[in-house]
Amino acid sequence: MLCYTFNPKYFDIYLVMLHILEHTLSHTIEDSVKLLPFLFFTYLLMELLEHTTGGKVQNKIKNAGKVGPLWGGLLGIMPQCGFSAAASSLYAGRVITVGTLLAVFLSTSDEMLPIFISEAVAPATIFKILGAKVCIAIISGFLAELVYVNVFKKKEKDMDIHVVCEEEHCSCEDGVLKSALKHTFKIFIYILLITFMLTFVIELIGEDQLAVVFQDIPVVGEMIAALVGLIPNCASSVVITELYLSGIIGAGAMMSGLLVNAGVGLLVLFRLNRDWKQNVGIMAALYGFGVFWGVIIELLGIVF
């Protein structure tokens, strides 16, 4: 007769894993659902442009790209990673320029602002950080545009929103509303799955363990914070903000991480933009700008 001995240790592990899965699922759904309005209205706009634009409108959009980084830096500061997802979609259709895209990515504050407010951080401090992010984003966006066009001799391609349709393997002849809904659903499922996996990994590792990797060594803290910021998930901005508020990382590392963090923007970029080398270059530029400005802030002893 076989006899099974109950081991409470395995039951505890089961409960912990169940709790992590429940927490991961709830956060994944909450974070992903927030993106739906941004995704839908972005694709709706792109469909309208695809179906109605003529040469004059395309030229206006192209010319507007010259001051795009200014608007990207200003609009990107809104506390929602939906703007970065929208910017990636617009860039894939060549509606905006690479400088504008980077300005949005660098300016995006994601979950930083809600956490600061909930932790009763002084309004003056919040405005200083937001102001610094906007200024850095605008300057970096224009600099990226300058280098891209004049140094690398690259030319921005003409607006081609239809490329998004081809990448999603859908028919854009279904009408504006139906096509926009199709795009939104497909990219939403993609974001949902990736977000779940990333959030699960972060939950397993734990924010406390992530804090251990930060060391009080010049540049290293900024480089590590920027790497954490590259995680295409709203949770990374939460980790960096909490570490800053708890005094584990300084202003430089905090700024590096939050500048690089673009929410799910990078996910959408790699999903929709065919040129993977260009995507890698944009990600490298984003990381480089984040580390550079973080080190500058640390060297100058700037505090917020």
Image (spheres, rainbow, N blue to C red):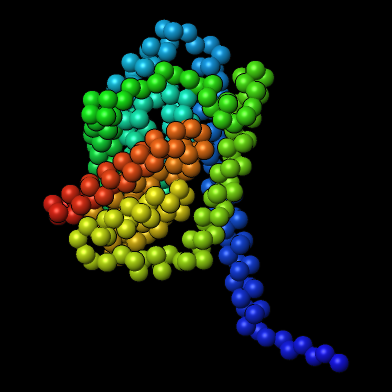
Q: Name the residue at 51% across, 66% down.
A: 204
Residue 255 pos. (x, y %): 28, 50
Q: Is residue 152 above or below residue 127?
A: above
Residue 234 left/right relative to 304: right
Q: Position of residue 247 (x, y in %)?
A: 28, 64
Task: Left or right? Give the position of 300 relative to 52.
Answer: left
Decide which of 268, 274 is in the foreground and name it.
Answer: 274
Q: Which of 272 and 136 is in front in this view?
A: 272
**Residue 11 sits in quarter:** bottom right
Give 126 or 263, whichever is nearer the viewer. 263
Q: Is residue 214 left or right of residue 208?
A: left
Would residue 7 be visible to someone looking at this image? Answer: yes
Q: Which residue lies furthest to the left in this view?
A: 300
- Residue under the point 55% across and 49% down: 194
Quadrant the N terminus occupies: bottom right
Give the image quarter of residue 276. Answer: top left
Q: Please, is residue 258 above or below residue 273 in the view?
A: below
In-image side of 129 versus 34 (left or right): left
Total numbered badges shown on the rendered structure:
0
Query: Residue 100 versus residue 81: which sits nearer the camera?
Result: 100
At horizontal 23% and vertical 66% (from top left) the residue drawn is 216
Question: Is residue 123 something that shows in the picture?
Answer: no
Image spot of residue 157 (x, y percent): 39, 21
Q: Where is residue 257 in the image (x, y as percent from the top left)?
A: 33, 52
